[in-house]
Amino acid sequence: MHGSLRDRRVLVTGASAGIGAAVATAAVQAGARVALLARKGDRLAETADRIGPAAVAVTCDVTDEAAVPGAVDEAAERLGGGLDAVVNSAGKFTIGGVSDTDPATWRSMFEVNVLGLLAVTKAAVPHLRDGRAPSVVNISSMSGRRVPRPESGVYAATKFAVHALGEALRLELGPQGIRVTTVAPGLVDTGIADGWPPGERTDQFRERLRGDGLAPEAVADVVVHVLAAPPEVNVVEYAVMSVNQ
């Protein structure tokens, strides 16, 4: 059961599919108005249309540091002139050990998972200061708590950074009344492996997602629960995984 987010204004990144789309859907079902932000404009518009009139689409790549502030301002304006919450859900995972991947692969994960999160959060803080029960929720991973296998080491490094930044932001923004939460899911059955090269490793990972992963809606329920907590309550971290994992 969703908690109440009645009339809350929520910005969700990575919202065209997967966890981000599920969070946007659940937030609207809980009474919020939601701005969906992602780089794939057509897919994003389709998701917003499916959710309904309480959802608006704002196309932006979170790695475009020059475009992010304007996109966040646009989202706040279209939601009625402010933000009450930001959910940083945009993420990227490319499988491979350090010895069989390249600097461009490492950099792309850090740019989305870490620098994109920072850029969106920085742009959103001025809007959140005047928000109701203002909150930042960062979607990290259980891989930000331990390194599960060598071929996900660089991805895990980005998520360790998300955990560290979550705590730093909590210490920085808490005195301003802004709550910061790190949500750490285990495997989630999303399209995160879309675009990986075909092969046995990709097939095995996709099979694990289907067999052992949570539904994105389960993570979305966690986010709504966190956002619906009383304003004086800051859930610092919420780790969740399937019983099958």
Image (spheres, rainbow, N blue to C red):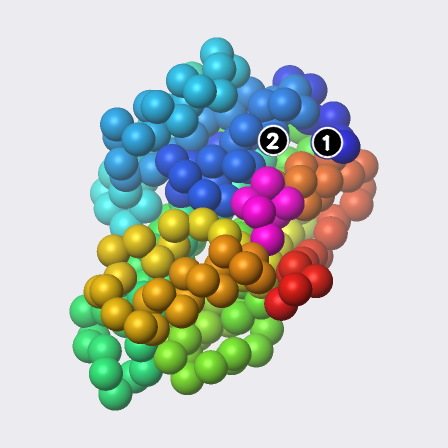
Image location (x, y in percent) of residue 146: 57, 78
Whether residue 79 is visible to the viewer of this picture, yes or no, is no
Image location (x, y in percent) of residue 78: 42, 17
Looking at the rendered structure, the kind of residue marked 1 is His
- Residue 17 vertical placement versus 161 (above, below): above
**Which residue position is annotated with label 2?**
26
Whether residue 91 is visible to the viewer of this picture, yes or no, is yes
64 sits to left or right of 72 = left
The N terminus lies in quadrant: top right
Counting labels gives: 2
- Residue 127 vertical placement versus 172 (above, below): above
Report the residue that reaches farthest toward the bottom: 99
Q: Which residue does the image show at 45% across and 43% down from the upper left? A: 18
Verify whether residue 217 appears in magenta: yes
The C terminus lies in quadrant: bottom right
Q: Which residues are magenta?
A: 214-219
Secondary structure beneath label 1: loop
Image location (x, y in percent) of residue 234: 74, 49
The disc at residue 2 is 1
Q: Earlier in the sequence, mark 1 or mark 2?
A: 1
Verify whether residue 209 appears in magenta: no
20 sits to left or right of 93 = right
Q: Which residue does the image show at 73% across and 52% down from the upper left? A: 235
Q: Mark 1 Cα within 10 Å, few/some/many (few <14, many 20+)?
A: some
Looking at the rendered structure, the kind of residue marked 2 is Ala
156 sits to left or right of 132 = left
Q: Main secondary structure of the magenta part?
A: helix
Q: Which residue does the image show at 35% across and 58% down from the upper left? A: 193
* Residue 197: quadrant of the picture: bottom left
